Image (tube, grey):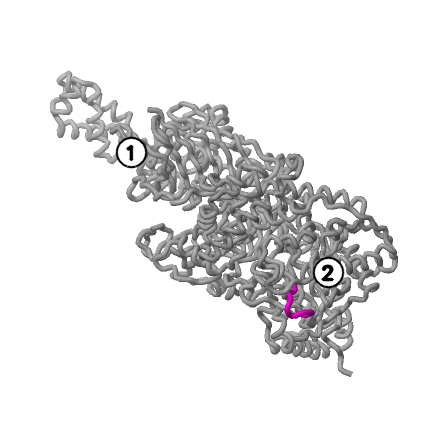
Amino acid sequence: MAMDWIRQPAYRLVELFRSDPSKIVDYVDSVYDRIQRVEPLVKAFITIRSREELLEEAQRIAKNVDSYVLPGILVAVKDNISTRGIRTTCASRMLENYVPPYDATVIERLKRAGALILGKTNMDEFAMGSTTETSAFFPTKNPWDLSRVPGGSSGGSAAALAAGEATLALGSDTGGSIRNPAAFTATYGLKPTYGLVSRFGLIAYASSLDQIGPMARCVEDLALLLQVIAGFDPRDATSLPVAVPNYLEELNRLWHEEPRLRIAVLRSLVEVSEEGVRKVFEDALNKLCSRHECEDVEVPYRDQIVAAYYIVAMAEASSNLARYDGVRYGLKTSFEGRSWIDVYTEVRTKGFGYEVRKRIALGAFVLSAGYRDAYYLKALRFRRLLKEYFDGLYKRFDIVVSPTMPILPPRLGELVSDPLRMYMADINTVIANLIGCPAISIPIGFYNGLPVGLQAMSKPLNEVTLLYLGKELQESLGYANLVSEVIR
Amino acid sequence: MKVRIGLEIHVQLTCLRSKLFCSTPSNYYDKPPNTCVCPVCLGLPGVLPVPNKKAIEAALMVALALNCEIAPKIVFVRKHYFYPDLPKNYQISQYDGPGMIPYARNGYLTIVVDGVKKIVRIRRINIEEDPGRLTYPTGSMITSPYSMVDYNRSGVALLEIVTEPDMESPKEARAFVEKLMAILEYLGVTDTSIEGAFRVDANVSIEGGERVEIKNIGSMKDVEKALNYEILRQRKVLESGGKVLREVRHWDPHKKVTVPVRGKEFEEDYRYFPDPDLPPIIVTKEWLEEIRRKMPELPDARIERFTKQYGLDEYRANILVLSKWLADLFEECAKMYSDYKKLADWLITDFLRWVKELNIDPKKRSWNPRSIVSLLQAMDRGLISVRMAKELMPKVVAEGIDVEKFIEEQKISKITDEKLLESIALEVFRENPKAVKDALKNPKAINFLVGGVMKKTRGRADPELTVKIVKRLLEAVEKGELSI
Amino acid sequence: MVGVCFAVMSRNVEELIDYLERLVLVKFSSDERAKLAQELPKILEFFRALDQVKELERYEPLFYVHDVPGRVRDDEPEEPWMKHEDLAMNAELVGEGYVKAPRTVVE
């Protein structure tokens, strides 16, 4: 009987390949066939490597399966993670032809683990968006409903998983960019503790908020991929010098010990969610509360959380994106007889889309001499207030839950046209970035055929508890290894 | 009209082997363009900075040497402006503001000008990264159709040292820079002889005028020259009833003038904020103590020691000490030669003059103290004259040879043969009857006759003996015992 | 300071946009300007929600999310591996390997 390579979780594939390395080639071929079939509909990738190249690498790895953690596993990588020799665009005209001369730390680690970099996935331009519609190239479609967005900004990675075009994926999360598309595509996504995964090679959006994280179709794969990418990196001064636990072992240990968790429910965030989201969330919550201690808690502020997040993110973005001037890399134009002001203005206007230019301008505004105190510093004060509030919660609770997104996946064009509504949709997810704690999105069901996710947060470096909760929901609700049929 | 001068000095920490935020070698000086670069110092998308420990230690050492208050944390900030030499279009630097602080503040430095001591206050010191270097295909910014960037220098560690406007003359400004450079050299953090290792910006104001900033002064001599020029220019403006406006001017080291830099059409807003990629580095008491222990003797302490240990006056001690290599040479010689004052004089006059004529970097070669001492000893013992010593110095010192042996081999000792000297002196008398008459009236005029003897012996005549003989012959002429 | 003269929600959105364009070196087309002129005041107004937080001044700005001291590296140089070819993948080189850039003179 032909093996169903598309739906297999990575941890099972690894076992299979260890006993029969020749199967790696069959697997790569099958996934590649699948891509050719569904990619024209989903449009998850900006760059896909050639079948020949992948097969060649697969054969090399097959000779030595035992020395790798992820031998031959196909990983889709968000296109803001630097890959040596593979175009890395950030879904921007600015970097349309940029080929990095170096690998991000996470890419080095994936390669050392024997994983195959399948290609680079679509995203919101420079990760600035929640729908993958601000990509300068094309929007990605939600594999569960092609008229809807897959979320963002790591929408390409999430869509690739949900459409069966990759086994694992890397995303990046500045304000929910992993969890939001995970929730919209019925996949699993984890934003690690700030500093757990090296940012070296992640093209910065907002440095104090950005984290690279794993995306997968089941909790075990999330743990497996996190294991490979997590850990101290001397090239990232914000990287935490901590020992990384063995996530899969720890997950299994907890799974057997079945500890009772103290769970806080961010009630006001549930209440303001769309009806469909609320319904699915309450069902899942009931399951959780039957085994754990649940208690409703309040979030002290709402608009302020989103405001503080966007101020910080835009301020840092305006700085991080200053380097794109078309001189060392990026969009080219003629320099002859023209001043740098002239050339830079042209390159940056043509190279950046509207949303990016808008955020850069706003970010510069909130940092400028007359306004820094009223905006930027206030946002940072609020950031401390929020952190202290959640530090308090984490003393009383192991886990804090809410819906990942307050809305169901919107139709293309629906959200992006109203910026404030789009920004407010990030309220549940931005908290974890503002306070640096880990957060997971777990698929908990569908409403009218549209996926709903539950977000769980916990104190810094407590990823294991999030994985445990994910495993419990995965086993009790059964939403594991889902792949959409992708119907036109 | 009172002049006030403040300085802003950028110094590279040339003691480092790698750049401030990446492991790329920092000795880019003779490398072809863009061969000392990596993704970090090119500011490629996705890179992150990691600070160089030794750079921080060197910076702290400088702050201690300049008597500064040191911040408990080293906070790096981003300073934003667009310019083609700046890879990220922001510079990682330091600033005073919310969540930000320069790593060192409120220091001071003592200078001595014309025997007068003066304190110049240091406002702050920043540690920051150097931008790349711009060049132009035609050599001129104005006529070139484009510019060319070499990023080899990009990311090299710099200190920006800013003084209060405490200096009142170009001479004082130069003395400050010289003293500062001496301190940096003693600390071993900066080799100031490397081209481009330091750059000075100066701001000058004359009573009744606005502050003018002069950029791009590249040498110690030019500090004085540029300021002299600028003060003269401002005086002329004021004297002719004009106004000195607040502006930025550029020092042109070739034409030796300051020229206005075209005003920026748009006022800068640098949008400083703490660099989120660089959590502040904690400066612990223990770390500071460890650095303090490693610090060498500094110029002020050495000057004081020279006055006590060698009995030198402050003036001589100052000149010796401010050139570390010269002070080191002095101390080596002083181990073998105990007339310290004579040694010091010889070194800071004849020796230093000759070294300057050589047009070489004296730090870059080794000097043999034994040959210098042997020269002085040969003089003391009357083997050679002062003039001979000066003539011999290049050969003796440059080749590091022993003077006595040399004299022996060359048979060039002083002529002490009285008869020979007398006959030479007679010759001089006969050739210069007018000088003889002068000498009879004015005893000071005998120098001409003595000089004549020296000339004929090419300086080898024993000077004291010659004077004796000339005097004796003059007496004889006066008494009529000798006619010429 | 040019920016200071803008009262935040002022009539002068157009001037604010001009100022920001020069500050970050971007331009907005006339369509984009029209849209931005709508969005900018709304977004800035929304940001002012922070003014409603009581006793916010009691909280020190949080610049770094973890209270972990900054790290340093040893001064060990690594041979530069980037060659002119690597640079030339994305930049235009001229002369002996200079990166070509625009003029540094404002007309």
Residue toward you, B134 or A149: A149
Q: Is residue C93 left or right of residue B69?
A: left
Q: Is residue A74 left or right of residue B1?
A: right
Task: Specify whether residue C95 is painted magenta.
Answer: no
Q: Classify the position of the C terminus of chain A by image quarter.
A: bottom right
The circle on residue B25 is none
Magenta segment's dominant SS is loop
Q: Secondary structure at mark 2?
A: helix
Q: Classify the position of the N terminus of chain A by image quarter.
A: bottom right
Q: Quadrant of residue A451?
A: bottom right
Residue shown at 48%/35% (left/top)? B183
Vertical relation: B199 (above or below) C37: above
| Chain under numbered label 1 | B
Q: Quadrant of residue B293?
A: top right
Residue shown at 29%/33% (left/top)? B233
Segment colored magenta:
A143-150
Give the residue number, with chain letter if any, for mark 1: B233
